[in-house]
Image: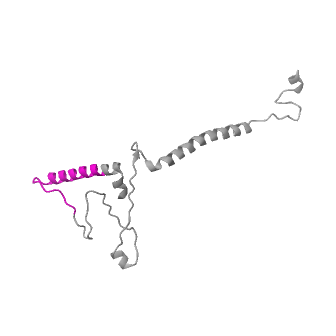
Protein backbone atom coordinates (compact mmCIF):
# COMPACT_ATOMS: atom_id res chain seq x y z
CA UNK A 1 0.00 0.00 0.00
CA UNK A 2 2.81 2.38 0.83
CA UNK A 3 4.30 1.89 -2.63
CA UNK A 4 1.00 2.80 -4.29
CA UNK A 5 0.57 5.98 -2.30
CA UNK A 6 4.23 6.97 -2.69
CA UNK A 7 4.22 6.60 -6.50
CA UNK A 8 2.34 9.39 -8.34
CA UNK A 9 1.69 7.25 -11.45
CA UNK A 10 0.12 4.44 -9.42
CA UNK A 11 -2.06 6.70 -7.27
CA UNK A 12 -3.38 8.58 -10.34
CA UNK A 13 -4.07 5.27 -12.08
CA UNK A 14 -5.89 4.04 -8.97
CA UNK A 15 -7.97 7.24 -8.84
CA UNK A 16 -8.93 6.89 -12.52
CA UNK A 17 -9.87 3.26 -12.01
CA UNK A 18 -11.99 4.11 -8.97
CA UNK A 19 -13.89 6.85 -10.81
CA UNK A 20 -14.62 4.58 -13.76
CA UNK A 21 -15.67 1.70 -11.50
CA UNK A 22 -18.05 3.87 -9.46
CA UNK A 23 -19.53 5.26 -12.67
CA UNK A 24 -19.96 1.75 -14.14
CA UNK A 25 -21.56 0.41 -10.94
CA UNK A 26 -23.95 3.36 -10.83
CA UNK A 27 -24.91 2.80 -14.49
CA UNK A 28 -25.57 -0.89 -13.82
CA UNK A 29 -27.82 -0.01 -10.90
CA UNK A 30 -29.65 2.64 -12.95
CA UNK A 31 -30.20 0.21 -15.84
CA UNK A 32 -31.47 -2.52 -13.54
CA UNK A 33 -33.96 -0.24 -11.88
CA UNK A 34 -35.73 2.81 -13.29
CA UNK A 35 -35.69 4.70 -10.01
CA UNK A 36 -32.24 6.07 -9.13
CA UNK A 37 -30.54 4.66 -6.06
CA UNK A 38 -27.79 6.09 -3.93
CA UNK A 39 -24.24 5.07 -4.74
CA UNK A 40 -23.19 1.71 -3.36
CA UNK A 41 -21.53 1.84 0.02
CA UNK A 42 -18.93 -0.54 1.35
CA UNK A 43 -20.62 -3.48 3.07
CA UNK A 44 -19.40 -5.50 5.99
CA UNK A 45 -18.58 -9.03 4.84
CA UNK A 46 -19.30 -10.73 8.19
CA UNK A 47 -15.73 -10.82 9.47
CA UNK A 48 -15.68 -7.23 10.63
CA UNK A 49 -13.88 -6.28 7.41
CA UNK A 50 -15.52 -3.87 5.02
CA UNK A 51 -15.54 -4.51 1.28
CA UNK A 52 -14.28 -1.69 -0.86
CA UNK A 53 -14.89 -0.68 -4.43
CA UNK A 54 -11.61 1.21 -4.38
CA UNK A 55 -9.25 -1.76 -4.32
CA UNK A 56 -9.08 -5.16 -5.87
CA UNK A 57 -10.91 -7.82 -3.91
CA UNK A 58 -9.36 -11.27 -3.96
CA UNK A 59 -11.40 -14.22 -2.75
CA UNK A 60 -9.20 -17.27 -2.39
CA UNK A 61 -9.43 -20.58 -0.61
CA UNK A 62 -6.88 -23.29 -0.01
CA UNK A 63 -7.23 -26.20 -2.40
CA UNK A 64 -6.73 -29.26 -0.24
CA UNK A 65 -8.58 -32.05 1.51
CA UNK A 66 -7.75 -33.38 4.95
CA UNK A 67 -9.24 -35.80 7.44
CA UNK A 68 -8.96 -33.10 10.10
CA UNK A 69 -12.63 -32.07 10.49
CA UNK A 70 -11.77 -28.83 12.32
CA UNK A 71 -9.46 -27.69 9.54
CA UNK A 72 -12.08 -28.52 6.93
CA UNK A 73 -14.86 -26.63 8.73
CA UNK A 74 -12.80 -23.59 9.70
CA UNK A 75 -10.52 -22.92 6.76
CA UNK A 76 -7.71 -20.46 7.51
CA UNK A 77 -7.25 -17.39 5.35
CA UNK A 78 -5.05 -17.65 2.29
CA UNK A 79 -2.45 -14.96 1.70
CA UNK A 80 -2.16 -13.51 -1.80
CA UNK A 81 0.47 -11.18 -3.21
CA UNK A 82 -0.58 -8.64 -5.80
CA UNK A 83 2.30 -7.31 -7.86
CA UNK A 84 1.76 -4.00 -9.61
CA UNK A 85 4.22 -3.95 -12.49
CA UNK A 86 3.93 -1.44 -15.33
CA UNK A 87 4.09 -2.79 -18.88
CA UNK A 88 6.43 -1.66 -21.64
CA UNK A 89 4.28 -0.90 -24.74
CA UNK A 90 1.49 -3.04 -23.19
CA UNK A 91 3.46 -6.19 -24.02
CA UNK A 92 6.26 -6.84 -21.55
CA UNK A 93 6.24 -6.31 -17.78
CA UNK A 94 8.99 -3.91 -16.79
CA UNK A 95 10.49 -6.38 -14.31
CA UNK A 96 10.93 -8.96 -17.10
CA UNK A 97 12.79 -6.60 -19.46
CA UNK A 98 16.29 -7.62 -18.26
CA UNK A 99 15.40 -11.31 -18.64
CA UNK A 100 14.03 -10.73 -22.15
CA UNK A 101 17.18 -8.78 -23.06
CA UNK A 102 19.37 -11.60 -21.76
CA UNK A 103 17.42 -14.21 -23.75
CA UNK A 104 17.64 -12.09 -26.90
CA UNK A 105 21.40 -11.66 -26.45
CA UNK A 106 21.76 -15.40 -25.85
CA UNK A 107 19.76 -16.21 -29.01
CA UNK A 108 21.85 -13.89 -31.21
CA UNK A 109 25.14 -15.20 -29.78
CA UNK A 110 23.95 -18.79 -30.26
CA UNK A 111 23.14 -18.07 -33.90
CA UNK A 112 26.67 -16.85 -34.64
CA UNK A 113 28.37 -19.56 -32.60
CA UNK A 114 26.34 -22.24 -34.40
CA UNK A 115 27.49 -20.81 -37.75
CA UNK A 116 31.14 -21.07 -36.68
CA UNK A 117 30.66 -24.64 -35.41
CA UNK A 118 28.81 -25.63 -38.60
CA UNK A 119 31.66 -24.34 -40.81
CA UNK A 120 34.24 -26.17 -38.69
CA UNK A 121 32.28 -29.43 -38.92
CA UNK A 122 31.71 -28.93 -42.65
CA UNK A 123 35.47 -28.48 -43.24
CA UNK A 124 36.27 -31.48 -41.05
CA UNK A 125 33.90 -33.65 -43.08
CA UNK A 126 35.46 -32.79 -46.50
CA UNK A 127 36.71 -35.91 -48.31
CA UNK A 128 40.47 -36.44 -48.31
CA UNK A 129 42.27 -37.61 -51.47
CA UNK A 130 43.19 -41.23 -50.96
CA UNK A 131 45.92 -42.96 -52.98
CA UNK A 132 44.60 -46.19 -54.43
CA UNK A 133 46.54 -49.47 -54.34
CA UNK A 134 47.33 -49.53 -58.10
CA UNK A 135 49.07 -46.18 -58.00
CA UNK A 136 46.24 -44.11 -59.39
CA UNK A 137 45.06 -40.98 -57.61
CA UNK A 138 41.40 -40.15 -58.14
CA UNK A 139 41.15 -42.49 -61.10
CA UNK A 140 44.04 -40.87 -63.04
CA UNK A 141 47.44 -42.34 -63.87
CA UNK A 142 50.14 -40.51 -61.86
CA UNK A 143 52.34 -40.30 -64.95
CA UNK A 144 49.64 -38.47 -66.90
CA UNK A 145 48.92 -36.15 -63.97
CA UNK A 146 52.52 -34.92 -63.80
CA UNK A 147 52.86 -34.53 -67.57
Q: Position of residue 140 (x, y in %)?
A: 84, 27
Q: Position of residue 145 (x, y in %)?
A: 86, 24
Region of the chain picked out in magenta, as a range: 14-42
Residue 15 falls inside the magenta stretch: yes
Tell me which residue sits at (33%, 55%) in the image.
Answer: 5
Residue closest to the far top? 147
Residue closest to the far front? 6
Q: Is residue 54 left or right of residue 65?
A: left
Residue 18 falls inside the magenta stretch: yes
Identify the image quadrant of residue 112: top right
Identify the image quadrant of residue 121: top right
Residue 112 versus residue 124: which sits nearer the camera? 112
The N terminus lies in which quarter of the figure? bottom left
Q: Is residue 51 left or right of residue 76?
A: left
Q: Position of residue 142 (x, y in %)?
A: 88, 27
Tell me which residue sits at (89%, 31%) in the image.
Answer: 135
Q: Is residue 130 left or right of residue 105?
A: right
Work out whether 42 lies above or below 99.
below
Residue 9 versus residue 117: which sits nearer the camera? 9
Q: How many marks?
A: 0
Residue 29 versus residue 99: which sits nearer the camera? 99
Q: Position of residue 75 (x, y in %)?
A: 35, 73
Tell me which residue sits at (32%, 51%) in the image.
Answer: 11
Tell me which residue sits at (27%, 56%) in the image.
Answer: 54
Rendered image coloring scheme: one colour
Q: What secondary structure predominates along the stretch shown in magenta? A: helix
The C terminus lies in which quarter of the figure? top right
Q: Is residue 134 left or right of residue 58?
A: right
Residue closest to the far left? 35
Amino acid sequence: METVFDTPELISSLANFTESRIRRLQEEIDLADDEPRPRPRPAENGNGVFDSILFLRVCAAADYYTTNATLMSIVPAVDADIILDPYIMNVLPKSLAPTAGYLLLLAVASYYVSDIVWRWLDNAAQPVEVQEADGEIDGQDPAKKNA
